[in-house]
């Protein structure tokens, strides 16, 4: 289970760091803010990235999720692992729901959501679920 914890942390580390950079106004890996917003948010007509507070909150949440499998003595670890499994599972499934497609139809987000973001969330969901039942 050690390697699964490492995998979860590695999969969450990159998006966490990107959200931290976005929170401080560093538009990476795309320098054009409007283009970056189309890639990572996908809402129609959006020309600006979300503000520093939402980006910082996502950074904190992803960082906590990345650390959680390693916090073996944390008293609420198992329920939080199950909550993480649920959150990532719902987000992963959303990528394939018509109502979600209507909310975030912009390209290239829509394609990336179904090919990368959604599947990544489903993998994370399954990993958190496995870890909640078998992790040490």
Image (cartoon, rainbow, N blue to C red):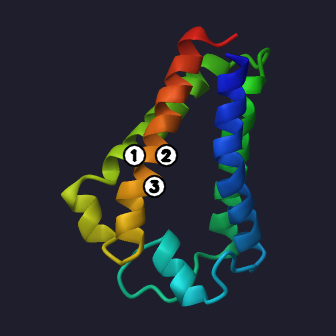
Q: Quadrant of residue 36?
A: bottom right
- Identify the residue position indicated by label 2 in the image: 120
Residue at the location (73% across, 45% down)? 63
Whether pointer 3 and pointer 2 mark residues with C-beta atoms closer than 8 Å, the reply is yes
Q: Quadrant of residue 79?
A: top right
Determine whether the residue tagged by mark 3 lies in a helix, strand or loop: helix
Determine whether the residue tagged by mark 2 lies in a helix, strand or loop: helix
- Label 2 to label 1: alpha-carbon separation: 7 Å
User: Which one is in front in this view, the residue at disc 2 or the one at disc 1?
Assistant: 2
- Specify whether 15 is left or right of 118: right
- Identify the residue position indicated by label 3 in the image: 116
- Identify the residue position indicated by label 1 in the image: 92
Along the viewing direction, whichever of 103 and 120 lies nearer the viewer:
120
Residue at the location (58% across, 9% down)? 134
Mark with earlier residue (2, 1): 1
Along the viewing direction, whichever of 58 and 127 lies nearer the viewer:
127
Q: Residues within 10 Å of mark 1 (few under 14, many from 20)?
A: many
Q: Whole-percent x and y of residue 9?
A: 70, 38
For the C terminus, the quadrant is top right
Q: Is residue 55 above or below residue 25?
A: above
Residue at the location (41% across, 75% down)? 108
Q: Whole-percent x and y of residue 19?
A: 68, 63
For the N terminus, the quadrant is top right
Q: Is residue 8 above or below residue 129?
A: below
Mark with earlier residue (3, 1): 1
């Amino acid at each position: 289970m050690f390697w699964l914890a490492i995998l979860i942390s590695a999969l969450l580390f990159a998006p966490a760091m990107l959200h931290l950079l976005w929170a401080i106004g560093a538009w990476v890996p795309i320098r054009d803010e409007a283009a970056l917003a189309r890639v990572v948010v996908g809402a129609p007509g959006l020309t600006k990235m979300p503000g520093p507070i939402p980006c910082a909150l996502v950074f904190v949440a992803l960082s906590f999720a990345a650390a959680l499998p390693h916090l073996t003595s944390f008293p609420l670890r198992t329920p939080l692992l199950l909550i993480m499994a649920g959150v990532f599972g719902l987000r992963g499934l959303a990528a394939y729901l018509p109502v979600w497609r209507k909310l975030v139809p912009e390209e290239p987000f829509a394609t990336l959501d179904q090919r990368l973001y959604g599947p990544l969330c489903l993998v994370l969901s399954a990993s958190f679920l496995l870890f909640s039942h078998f992790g040490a």
